[in-house]
Each structure stands twice: as structure tokens, then as C-alpha cells.
Image (cartoon, rainbow, N blue to C red):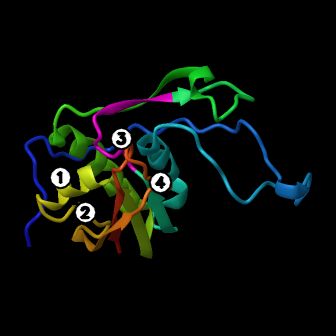
Amino acid sequence: MPTLAWPTKSLADPEPAELFLDSLVYPCGHGYPDSLPENRLYLGDNLKVMAALLPEYEGRIDLIYADPPFFTNKRFPARIGRGEDSRRPQDWQLAEGYGDRWGTLDEYLDFLYPRLAMMVRLLAPPGSCSMNFSATSACSTRSSGPITVPRRSGGPSTANTIRSWHIPRAINTPSTPMPSASLTIQIR
């Protein structure tokens, strides 16, 4: 079976993030003050956060959904103002946001591959991982072959379901006629 290979492909153990409790949220007040909330939300580099979760969750997560960068080679600003009129983007307070810039496809894959491998380590044996890619990144990775990541048992785990579909944009005007597209890769 062909595999996706590139010159800088490597897999090293990432440095785990230092996780700390910042806030507690009790939806509708359920459980307050007698118990801790059942769910958690982490803010940080997902690779480092997943590495920090390994001791507690390795092989125990049933479903992982990821929406990685789309290989657009663009920079996206972050909206930081509060109470702004969403109909007046010219008035928004913006800051440096997310940079989806990659010099080459190899750099993009170097970012993606260790995260896929970490997700596989966190998945329970019957678990699934679903990822969405844009048409740009999907075409780049699909043309090279299936994405293969090592399973905990040492054998390969190959993306066995690749689906792509066309999703019409909510606003499709002559100035924005470009369709949205999505590719899902599932690892089982």
C-alpha cells in the first residue's frame, strides 16, 4: 500500500503543556457547588495539550474531531472588540490572529502528522477520528497517497474513509462565486 512520504517526515514526542484550572462553568447551575463539571475546555497548542492528556486518556477517547488549518497560505485577523456591530466590519477591533501560512506542502505535513499520531494514541481501540480539510489541502494530500499514522500496537492505521463534497456558500453572489468544499478523513 502506498503511503504519504516527504523529505522531512519525522515523529518525536512533543513537550506536554502545563495544564491549569482557570475557570469552572456549571451549565444551568447543575452540580454547583458539590461536584466538579464533567467536561473540560483547554486553550493552547493542541499538540502540547494532547501530550499533557496522555497520562490520563491514552487509549480511552472514543471520538476526536479536528478541523486543522486549510493550507490557504493566508493570515487571518482575530476580532477582539466586544459589543461591536457585526454588520460593520470596518469598525471592528482586530489583532494578529491565525496564520495559515506554509512555505511548502512538506511544512504543512510536518505540522499535521504529529497531531494525527497523537490523536491515534489517545483513541480507544474502537475509537474514530474525523478531520475536515479544505479543497486545497485535500487535493494536495490526496494526490500523494493515503495518510498513514502508527497505531499504539505498532502497525499502521490508514485513513479508510475519504469523503469530499460540495457545500454551497450561504451567500453566493457574482463577487463571491467560489464554492466551499470539505474533505473528511476518518481513522478507525
If you read the primary sequence from the N terminus, does the residue marked by circle 1 or circle 4 appear first?
Answer: 4
Residue at the front extreme?
A: 174
Tell me if 159 is positioned left or right of 64 in this view: left
Please report the residue visible at 41 percent of the width from the left and 65 percent of the height from the top. 130
Whether residue 125 appears in this view of the structure is: no
Q: Is residue 20 magenta?
A: no
**Alpha carbon of mark 2 to alpha carbon of mark 4: how far?**
16 Å
Q: Nearer the viewer, mark 1 or mark 3?
A: 1
Residue to which mark 4 is pinned = 54
Task: Identify residue type, mark 3.
Answer: Pro
Q: Which amino acid does label 1 sit on?
A: Ser
Who comes first in sequence, dot 3 or dot 2?
3
Query: Disc 4, disc 3: CB below 8 Å?
Result: no
The quarter in which the N terminus is drawn is bottom left
Where does the C terminus fall, quadrant-wise? bottom left
Magenta stretch prevailing secondary structure: loop
Which element type, helix, strand or loop, lies under badge 3?
Answer: loop
Q: Looking at the image, is mark 1 or mark 3 earlier in the sequence?
A: 3
Three-letter code, disc 4: Leu
Q: Residue furthest bottom?
A: 126
Residue 93: percent from left, percent from top: 61, 20
Q: Report, in whole angstroms, how far the alpha carbon at label 2 lies from the one at label 1.
A: 21 Å
Residue occupying image coordinates x 49% and y 44%: 49
Residue 140: give its label.
1
Q: Which mark is residue 150?
A: 2
Q: Does the rendering let one see residue 86?
A: yes
Magenta highlight range: 68-77
**Of label 4 and label 3, which has the lower sequence position?**
3
Say which amino acid is labelled 2.
Answer: Pro
- Quick one: 67 or 168, which is closer to the camera? 168
